[in-house]
Amino acid sequence: MDALSEVLRLARFSASVTLDATARAPWCVSVAAGSSILRAHLVVDGTLELRLAGADPVTLKAGDIALLTHGDAHLVGSALDAPAKALSSLVKAPVAGEPMPISLGGDGEPTRWIALSASLERHLSEPYIDALPRVMRVNLGNAKALDSLTDALGLTLSASDAPAVGAGAERASLAELVLVEAMSRYVERLAPGGKGWLAGLADRYVGRALALVHGRPAEAWTVEKLGRQVGLSRSALADRFSEVMGEPIFGFLTRWRLQMAAEILLTTPRSIESIAHDAGYESAGAFSAAFKRVFGKPPSTWRRKRRR
C-alpha cells in the first residue's frame, strides 16, 4: 500500500458528484467557501475558466480537472464577469436516485461540466493537503475512471425504468477514483529535486518508507529496520529522508502517530494510557504534553469537545 492511499483511507476520504451540467456561453457560477470540503471541476467537453479571489484565472479544457484543496470561494464559467448563479441554487434533488442533468447560460458555445465534492478528516490528511497548491489542475486524458464516470452519468431513466441497483454508490466510487487519479498524476509529474511530502511520495526510497510508516504507525520502527525494508543502509536512508522531506524520520513518525492518536480518541472508547502506549510514549503525561503541542489541547479535552 502506498502512502497516499494510506492517508486517504485513514482520513476517511469520500467523494460524490455535485452537479452534471451543460452550460452555454455566457455563464458564471459562484461556489461558496467550505473549509471541510474539497471541490473539483471536471470538463468533459468545451472549456471554462476558474478563478479564486485575487488570483489569475485558470483555463480548463476537455479532459482537465481542477481540484481546490482548501475549500476557497471561487467562480467558474465562460465569462467570469457575467452575473453569477450560486452553485447551491443549481443542485437539484435526485429523481429515483438519479442526478438530474442541469442546463444554464445563454445560447453560445456549450460546455459539459461536472462538479465534484470530497470530504476527509483534515487532521489526518494535513501532510498531503497542505503540500498541494490551492488549485491543482491535471489533465485526465485516457483515464479509465473519467470514461466510466461520464458513462455512468450519461445513463438516463425512461418512464418505465427502475433505478439501477447500486448506481448511487457506483457514482460515488467513480468520483473518488477520478480524484485519486488526479492526485496521483499530479505527484507523478512533479519535477525532480523537490522537497516535502509530495516529493517524498515520488521518491523511490522515501516513498516506500512513508508507506510503511503510514501503514504500520504503531510498529517499533528504527531507521535500520526501515532501511532494510526499503533497500538502503541506515545512514543512507536517514540522509535521503531528511534531504527530501526536510525533517528526520522520527520527527515525521512522531507527528503521524499523534495524528493517528487524535483519530483514535474520537472513534474509540480506549483509555488515554492505551493510546499513548501505541503512539510510542512511556507515560500518559508525556503523551498529553506532546499532543497539546500539536493540537492545542490535551487529549481528554480534544475527545470531549470534538465528540460534542
Image (cartoon, grey):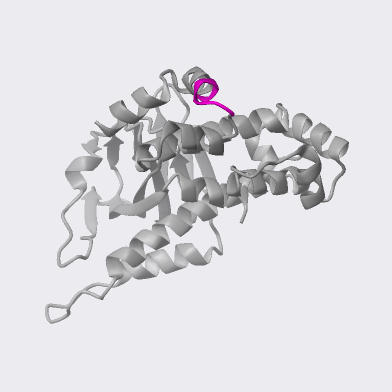
237 over 10 or under it: above or below: above
- Camera-nearest residue between 165 and 273: 273
The residue shown at (26%, 75%) is: 165
101 over 78 or under it: above or below: below
Q: Quadrant of residue 32?
A: top left
Tell me residue 300's x, y (percent): 37, 25
Asked whether 283 falls inside the magenta stretch, the response is yes
In the picture, the quarter occupied by the N terminus is bottom right
In the picture, the quarter occupied by the C terminus is top left
Q: Is residue 257 left or right of residue 212?
A: left
Tell me residue 280's x, y (percent): 60, 34
Q: Is residue 288 left or right of residue 72?
A: right
Q: Quadrant of residue 297?
A: top left
Tell me residue 164's x, y (percent): 25, 75
Q: Can the viewer see residue 116 in this picture? A: yes
Q: Which residues are magenta?
A: 282-287
156 over 114 or under it: above or below: below
Residue furthest bottom as drawn: 160
32 over 21 or under it: above or below: above
- Camera-nearest residue between 73 and 83: 73
